[in-house]
């Protein structure tokens, strides 16, 4: 008789069956584990909406987490009860939501972009140029493959972006030569891997099942591969993954400090800047929405509030005073 897997193993299996990302898997496992320990290691099947509400209120009141963090924890627990325990959670009672804040995105001016890029070199510079020049999310940039670069049409194809959506974005002319050089580097690494008979790169689930050898083909190789081999945390197969996400973030942070820019800049700031600068150049907001991959145009409209020109047309009364300070 087969022994039933442990709870967290069941959660992992359910997440992988639905093809959720590895980052989502790690996050959900973390929240479920915290939920269990918060209630003195009681099994979730013996708990319900009241216990979920108490845990989420603890996050908001005691831990003072952001609303998005609290909502992420709720999503993890809903997934646990719905897809693993097969139990209706019902209305979560006694729940105190974290106070929502309206944040405007941080945007760099074009002069600041030039200043920051002047302090980055090599591969991190190319990746930052693509995030700004094509409006890519950080992980979309990391997960680019050779076949996603279309030099003839001057475009990049983003595969399975947020919400599992594909889209086309412009290929910045300034990056073309650097990308061609990077492709030659990838070809050499790929040749070495084939000579060592290493496993191919990670593939989307359906592709890997239908074409098991596709991972060894050149077109499927990462555009930004790691120089080190690593073990796939899910399959335990040793293969070449893409460059670690923290590498570019560290180079960007260092460049911002060296530029003496007093803004909280992350890789996503480059995407914010891409959208804002397009709108400042009178690009149609629907076009910007499509390039960013937003479902709702209202998400894109937030960038109109940080544009260089005053969207309201209002002038400060201080500027109308005629006196010397």
Image: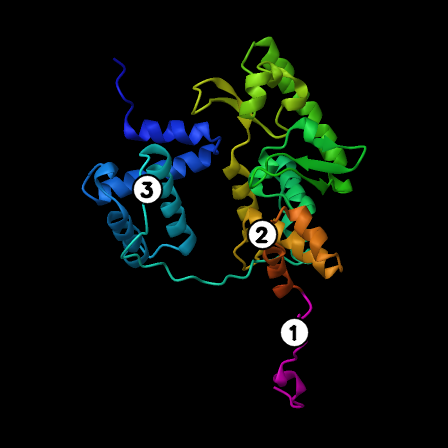
Q: Nearer the viewer, residue 132 or 301?
A: 301
Q: Which residues are magenta?
A: 308-325
**Secondary structure mostly taken by the magenta-highlighted segment of the chain:** loop
Q: Is residue 318 magenta?
A: yes
Q: CA distance from mark 3 to mark 2?
A: 40 Å
Sequence order check, earlier mark of 3 and 2: 3
Q: Secondary structure at mark 3?
A: loop
* Vertical position of residue 87 compared to residue 284: above or below: above
Q: Nearer the viewer, mark 3 or mark 2?
A: 3
Disc sitting over residue 242 in the figure: none
Give the total number of marks visible in the rendering. Answer: 3
Q: Is there CB contact under 8 Å for labels 1 and 3?
A: no
Label 3: how many Cα within 10 Å (few below 14, some 14–19, many 20+)? few
Residue 209: x and y, percent? 55, 18
In the image, residue 235 above or below residue 150: above
Label 1 vs 3, first from the N-terminus: 3
Mark linked to residue 312? 1
Residue tagged by mark 2?
269
* In this rendering, position of residue 285 left or right of residue 34: right
x and y percent of residue 322 in the render? 67, 90
Mark 2 secondary-structure assignment: helix
Q: Return the residue at label 3.
A: 88
Q: Residue at x 57, y 37 (%)?
A: 164
Corner quadrant of residue 3: top left
Q: Nearer the viewer, residue 304 or 296?
A: 296
Which quarter of the image is occupied by the C terminus?
bottom right
Which label lies toward us, 2 or 1?
A: 1
């Amino acid at each position: 008789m087969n022994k039933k897997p442990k709870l967290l193993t069941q959660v992992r299996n359910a997440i992988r069956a639905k093809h959720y990302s590895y980052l989502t898997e790690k996050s959900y496992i973390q929240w479920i584990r915290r939920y269990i320990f918060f209630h003195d290691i009681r099994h979730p099947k013996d708990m319900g909406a009241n216990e979920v509400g108490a845990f989420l209120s603890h996050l908001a009141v005691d831990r003072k987490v952001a609303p998005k963090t609290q909502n992420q924890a709720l999503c993890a627990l809903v997934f646990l009860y719905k897809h693993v325990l097969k139990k209706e959670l019902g209305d979560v009672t006694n729940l105190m939501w974290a106070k929502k804040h309206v944040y405007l995105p941080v945007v760099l001016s074009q002069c600041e972009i030039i200043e920051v890029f002047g302090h980055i070199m090599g591969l991190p510079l190319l990746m930052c140029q693509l995030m700004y020049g094509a409006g890519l999310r950080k992980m979309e940039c990391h997960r680019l493959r050779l076949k996603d670069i279309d030099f003839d049409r001057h475009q990049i194809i983003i595969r399975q972006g947020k919400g599992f959506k594909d889209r086309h974005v412009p290929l910045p002319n300034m990056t073309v030569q650097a990308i061609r050089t990077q492709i030659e580097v990838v070809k050499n690494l790929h040749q070495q891997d084939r000579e060592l008979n290493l496993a191919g790169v990670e593939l989307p689930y359906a592709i890997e099942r239908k074409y098991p050898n596709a991972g060894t083909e050149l077109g499927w190789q990462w555009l930004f591969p790691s120089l080190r081999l690593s073990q796939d945390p899910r399959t335990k197969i040793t293969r070449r993954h893409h460059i670690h996400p923290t590498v570019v973030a560290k180079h960007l942070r260092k460049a911002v400090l060296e530029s003496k820019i007093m803004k909280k800049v992350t890789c996503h700031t480059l995407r914010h800047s891409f959208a804002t600068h397009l709108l400042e150049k009178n690009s149609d907001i629907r076009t910007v929405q499509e390039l960013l991959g937003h479902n709702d145009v209202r998400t894109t409209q937030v960038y109109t509030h940080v544009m260089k020109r005053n969207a309201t047309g209002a002038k400060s009364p201080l500027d109308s005073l005629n006196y010397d300070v």
